[in-house]
Amino acid sequence: MYKKHKIGIGVILVIAFSICYFLALDFSDIIGDIISAISIILGFSIAALTSMLGRDYLTAMQKRVDKQNQTQTELFTVMKYYKFNVCVNIVTIIILIFYKAFIGKLTIQPISPIPPGQPAPFVFANFLGEVLSASVFSLIVIDFVSLWFVFNLFITFIRNDAHIASRKNSSDII
């Protein structure tokens, strides 16, 4: 992946985690729906990858050096994006399953009224639940960002395939 995308993902991860943690967002009721959505994203990624196999432009991409990173080919860059996307999707699904299985045991307990001047007690289950929730939310955001990367690559491949096909057809005519 390009350095600018790695930095952008890191910034998005920190912002998403902070927003969810400080706003105390709870989405435990829709975890099943989120798992379904992430599974669909994973399916799209795999389908996009398999649709590219055996295409002429993959051979061309293997021979061309990436303009933004001169140390690797365009095909290697694309494979790094796909690997990142699939890994993030699988990790998110595993964490969501863990979250769904254990969030019932980590339910946030209401804290009894605190007398004036007394510090609020630290409840580990509350803290762990909030951190898990914020982690899951930030991973979901990163899933959609990586989907955006893969979708843009897929559109680029379709465009490149059309250019290669038109060049091949024009050379057949001449």
Image (cartoon, helix red, strand yellow):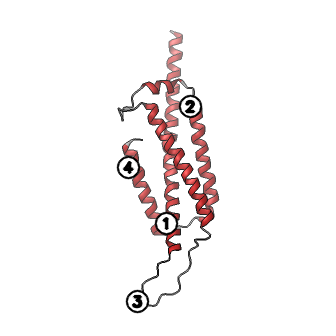
Image coordinates for residue 126, horizontal then vertical, percent: 52, 73
Q: Which residue is mark 1?
A: 131
- Spatial distance from mark 3 to mark 1, Cα to Cα? 27 Å
Residue under the image location 61 percent in, 55 percent down: 35
**Within 10 Å of the Cα at label 2, are there few (<14), some (14-19), or many (20+) other Cα atoms?**
some
What residue is pinned by disc 2? Answer: 52
**Image position of 116 (left or right of 129):** left
Mark 2 element type: helix
Q: Nearer the viewer, residue 113 or 144?
A: 113
Q: Above or below — where is 10 with respect to 17?
A: above
Amino acid beneath label 4: Ile
Q: What separation in Å lies between label 4 and label 1 (alpha carbons)?
A: 22 Å
Quick one: label 4 or label 2, which is nearer the N terminus? Answer: 4
Q: CA distance from mark 3 to mark 4?
A: 43 Å
Q: Residues within 10 Å of mark 3 (few under 14, many from 20)?
A: few
Q: Position of residue 24 (x, y in %)?
A: 50, 69
Q: Which residue is mark 4?
A: 7
